[in-house]
Amino acid sequence: MTETLNIPPRWRAFIRRGSAMVWLSGAALALSLLMMVGLVGYIAAKGLGFFWPSSIVQVQTSEGPILGEISAQEKAHGTDPAKTQFRVCNRDLFGQDYRWVPSADIQDPQRPADAVLVERLENGPFIGFIQDGSSGETLVLRAVDGQTLEIPRKHIVRIVPSNALGVFGKSRVYASRLWEFVAGDPRESNTEGGVFPAIFGTVMMVLLMSIAVVPLGVVAALFLREYARQGWVIRALRIAVNNLAGVPSIVFGIFGLGFFIYTVGGTLDQIFFSQKLPTPTFGTGGILWASLTLALLTVPVVIVSTEEALSAVPRSQREASLALGATKWQTIWNVVLPGALPGILTGLVLAMARGAGEVAPLMLTGVVKLAPSMPLDASFPFLHLDRKFMHLGFHIYDVGFQSPNSEAAKPMVFMTTLLLLLIVLLLNLAALRLRSRLRARVGGSSF
């Protein structure tokens, strides 16, 4: 075939050796990595850049003065003129956080040194000037149009004089905002404040899911590989397990709602919490049912990985153990499972990555927009598996698609997405580190 195409001998040898496929595979891998780095970099730039204090600009327009941060600019397209977007804040005075202005209408841009951005617990930030700060309990602020507003000091999170700050001062504000995002509670319909309850709920749900999915998947894989008589029934079961991995996640959510919540949870309420009925205890969504639902969702991954790891344990090790008088179970417990542990942990890593990013099943089994209390606290019995919880994935969906203020929610969407990626990465690195230590200690499969 290659001769009929008049390909030079050097290239024919290059193709026969398979070098072309090697280079093609390398190029595809490089392109994939570049796309991944570009995606994560774009998310990080959009999210992390929001916390840096921007200059407060005052301009004159035909509709009056505008004071705010320049948040976006659009070039002219056809008959549409170039436009500039200002983050004007002052929602309680102006009714909107952002405002588009034709760029040609902007005149006399200035950066007033006394302009401040006041972050509040309610009604979003305020951009303007401090008119009277002599009172110990309140602060009088003045907007660019002359309107005044009196704010209790206990409702103020921080005051940022952006135009008067140097690099060091802006860095302190940046660090303060970033820490608030990681360790604080949400406010203003989750568009401001922090996401700590969502971080805690995500990590706790993944850990509970892992505790449930590993024993279930390992026991199932042990039966299929070590005990079951191989035949058409077992082949059908393996096909079913593989197909189960392709079932849409919302189907698992419906199953969790019907079986775990209504059936199991309702039965527990009837037996143990009848005095609280009709208010359900376990007969409603909670972190326990969400974790078990995701365990069923990810168990095919653990079963397949565990089976591969079990089959990779050398047969000679099994025969040596049996020859020394050990029973089959003793051989599995002391020889096979330790050798297969790295492969089992590989399945756990894949399950954690899959489960941490799922949202649809959680919407039916326990996740909420704002949880009044977390599943783990200082009150007895400390671990409250019946409580609803917040999740970073659902937080992204809620802020990005259900927020009444979509423009203000964009930075929170990017930051929450970046945080979810980092949490999944850290959980996976922890599991990979444990797998490496086990592999170095006991050897075993390379999966």
Image (cartoon, grey):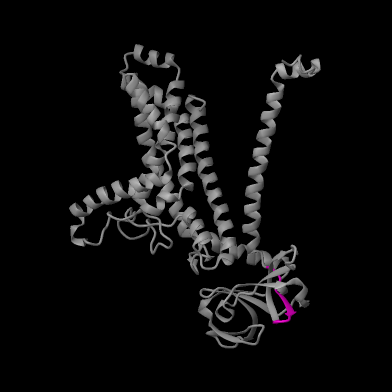
Q: What percent of the width, then of the height, locates residue 377?
A: 37, 59
**401 magenta-colored:** no
In the displayed structure, 306 sits above or below 87; it is above
| Residue lying farthest to the front in this orientation | 79
Q: Quadrant of residue 80?
A: bottom right
Q: What percent of the width, then of the height, locates residue 404?
A: 51, 68
Q: Which one is in front, 85 or 338?
A: 85
| Residue lying farthest to the top in this orientation | 323
How many numbered badges does the structure rendering display? 0
Q: Is residue 113 left or right of residue 351?
A: right
In the displayed structure, 132 sits above or below 209; it is below
In the displayed structure, 63 sits above or below 227; it is below
In the displayed structure, 357 sits above or below 24; it is below
Name the residue: 53% across, 65% down: 191
Q: What percent of the width, then of the height, locates residue 435?
A: 50, 33
Name the residue: 57% across, 81% down: 93
Name the residue: 66% across, 77% down: 116
Q: Is residue 287 left or right of residue 200?
A: left
Does the image show residue 240?
A: yes
Does the image show residue 333?
A: no
Q: Which one is in front, 88 or 225?
A: 88
Q: Quadrant of the N terminus?
A: top right
Q: Which residues are magenta?
A: 54-64
Name the residue: 58% across, 56% down: 414
Q: Which one is in front, 40 or 165?
A: 40
Q: What percent of the width, then of the height, locates residue 285?
A: 33, 55
Q: Is residue 390 left or right of residue 259?
A: right
Q: Is residue 343 left or right of residue 324?
A: right
